[in-house]
Image: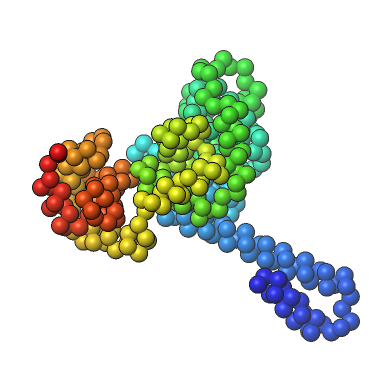
Amino acid sequence: MRRFCISTMVAGTMALTGPAMANSELGDVVGTIARTLLEQQQAAQETSLWQGVVENGSAAAYRQYLDAYPNGQFAREARQRLNGQAGQGNQGTAPVVTDSTAARAEAQLGLSRSDRMAIQRRLSSLGFYRSGIDGDFGSGTRRAIAAWQDARDLPGRGYLNANQVRQLLTSAETPATTPATGDGATSAAQAELNLRLTRSQRVQIQRDLIALGYDPRGADGLFGSGTREAIRSWQRDSGARVTGYVTEAQVRTLRNAGGDRTPAPTQNRAAELDEALLGLTRDERVAVQRRLINLGYLRGSADGVFGAATRSAIARWQGDNGLTESRYLTAEQVRTLQQQSRL
């Protein structure tokens, strides 16, 4: 289809300019068209990522967008939203940069992926970083940088300047701990990178993890610390090597296992709406969770928040009672659940 469009555009150009157009000029036209298409694709990619970031709404998501597009078309809005979140407080999330000057200064350093991996290794050896060495400065790396800066009374709040980069890469400080990750994690990160997963594929992986009871803290296509921890937990429970990064075979395994637990989208949406219309209070949700705990479907505490673990527990209870595993409750199911006792 794209070849047809290009041919049509070229033919139209030739009709306008006449048969006297030289071959070199024709090549220039095709090159211009190709560049235009490439620019459109790149803009569409950035827009798609931005939509996912806005849906997620977390400080970590906005930071990941800025890491990928420090001078992008939505960069100014991303920094403004980060500043707004900083004013409202963060409730345990990674520190937010209130001054976008630090982010711009780091972006201007032009750090390569190998530079970023070296920084992560150094932070790991000093005991500040406990995640994968992948060159991706997500929320975990930002927290580690901020902790290192705070420990040395340095400015930046999660973003580095040129002096700090030199200090990290040439420092002779004694490591506080043995590095938490090594060549194994690095090679696993590289192997996942080589898969060239699209955003929709990443979203599907997160949905499969949720269906299996592992909470990546949202299905937004952004593989931050929540997703990495969910992958590690799934790998550990599956008896696989624990890296926090997926292989091609593991992506297929997740899809097969998660697909068995995930109902059709339209059915799931209808069930979600039916439960929402019940208007369950927090106390009622706590009561549901306590019953699921008592029946052996849910572990942990009852907090009134129906996260991935609670949804998986509901699905298992529905399946054991001959009901469709929609992961959402109807009024009748709530009554049935409350009347059941542990066998």
Residue 1 visible = yes
The residue lying toward the viewer, choosing from 318 and 4, is 318
Above or below, comparing residue 337 to residue 243 in the picture: below
Where the C terminus falls, by quadrant? top left
Residue 98 visible = no
Q: Relative to 80, is 305 on the left or the right? A: left
The residue lying toward the viewer, choosing from 12 and 157, is 12
Q: How many tags in the picture? A: 0
At 64% from the left and 26% from the top, the residue drawn is 169
Above or below, comparing residue 36 to residue 151 in the picture: below
Q: Relative to 329, is 186 on the left or the right? A: right
Q: Residue 155 at what x, y percent from top left?
A: 52, 31
At 37% from the left and 53% from the top, the residue drawn is 262
Where residue 289 sits, quadrant-wise, is top left
Furthest residue to the left? Answer: 339
Q: Relative to 3, is 138 on the left or the right? A: left
Q: Residue 173 at what x, y percent from top left?
A: 58, 17
At 62% from the left and 62% from the top, the residue drawn is 41
Q: Residue 212 at what x, y percent from top left?
A: 37, 44
Above or below, comparing residue 121 to residue 249 in the picture: above
Furthest residue to the top? Answer: 174
Specify how the rendered protein is coloured. Answer: rainbow
The residue lying toward the viewer, choosing from 290 and 225, is 290
Where the N terminus falls, by quadrant? bottom right
